[in-house]
Image (cartoon, rainbow, N blue to C red):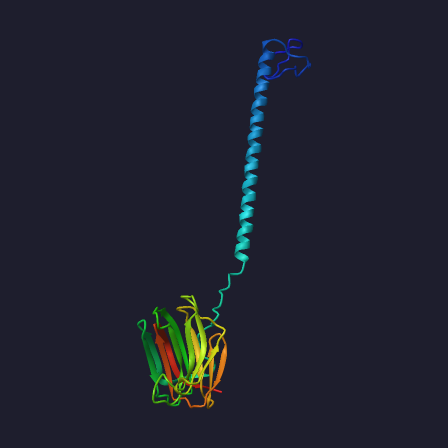
Amino acid sequence: MTCASCGAQNPSYAIHCISCGKPLVGADVQSAQAQSKTGWWIAGCLGLGLLVFVGMVAAVVVAIQNLAKEAERTSSAPPPRAVASPLGNPVPLPGFVGLPGQNQYLDLDTQDGHNSSWRHAELGNASALFAVFRVVRLGAHPSWRPAFFIGVQGPTAVPWYNHWVGLRLTPVSGSTASLVAEIDVVGNDRRHYERHFLKVHPDLDQRVGITIDWHTPHSVLFTLSNGETQRIEVPWPIASVVASASTGEMEVNPLVLGTLRR
């Protein structure tokens, strides 16, 4: 664009002469003004777009930082600890040694209203036993309550009536999944009867470990896998190991006869 005052050439978008500084006039001014407005509009759009782009980049950076912090918190957190069973790990007491040929497996699956039992009188040199058992099923009968027993017995001509002491499990009143644990003592012709309740309440299908030690004459020590113990004094010697189930099913695997090293 040529300045009318000094004849200098100016850019097409100029409004004032770059040489003399005087305003440029005529149609060229209008064209220059339009071009100037267009330039400012384009510049404004570019600026706004740049701001939006910068904002998006900043948001992405912040999100990545937050994810990195969350991943760091997750990876640095310790793994959750498994909750130990209230009955502990069903393993024998330290010092227990099983005897050869004295390993048994029992599955006392009993119909409702009936009783099944097992008795082992060939103890040899055994003075202790270790067993892992679980109540698999609770039956239902109007007259017979589910009951499960494992213990030892003295000399008797009538099994299951005299001279036995052991762990007895029965359902908690109103429950179909929890059991009451007690040590029962039955004397001559069932005239002498004792019940010693334990603190634990095993659940249905929960494996329970028990060690029974009768090394000391006329004394039987019961130790559950949670460490709970109960010592019972009896006036008779131990002659056999017994187990029974009524109106339900109990599995014993294994039942090992042996000794406890002292």
Q: Nearer the viewer, residue 141 or 164?
A: 141
The quarter holding residue 23 reads top right
Rendered position, 129 above or below 251: below
Q: Residue at x 34, y 78 (%)?
A: 105
Q: Is residue 204 left or right of residue 86?
A: left
Q: Nearer the viewer, residue 70 or 98?
A: 98
The quarter holding residue 11 reads top right
**Residue 86 in the image, given as x and y percentages of width and height:** 48, 70
Q: Residue at x 67, y 10 (%)?
A: 6
**Residue 31 in the image, given as x and y percentages of width and height:** 57, 13
Quadrant of the rendering where the N terminus is positioned: top right
The quarter holding residue 157 reads bottom left
Q: Is residue 86 left or right of residue 17?
A: left
Rendered position, 6 above or below 85: above
**Residue 47 in the image, given as x and y percentages of width and height:** 58, 29
Q: Is residue 76 left or right of residue 253?
A: right
**Residue 85 in the image, given as x and y percentages of width and height:** 47, 69
In this rendering, the count of numbered labels is: 0
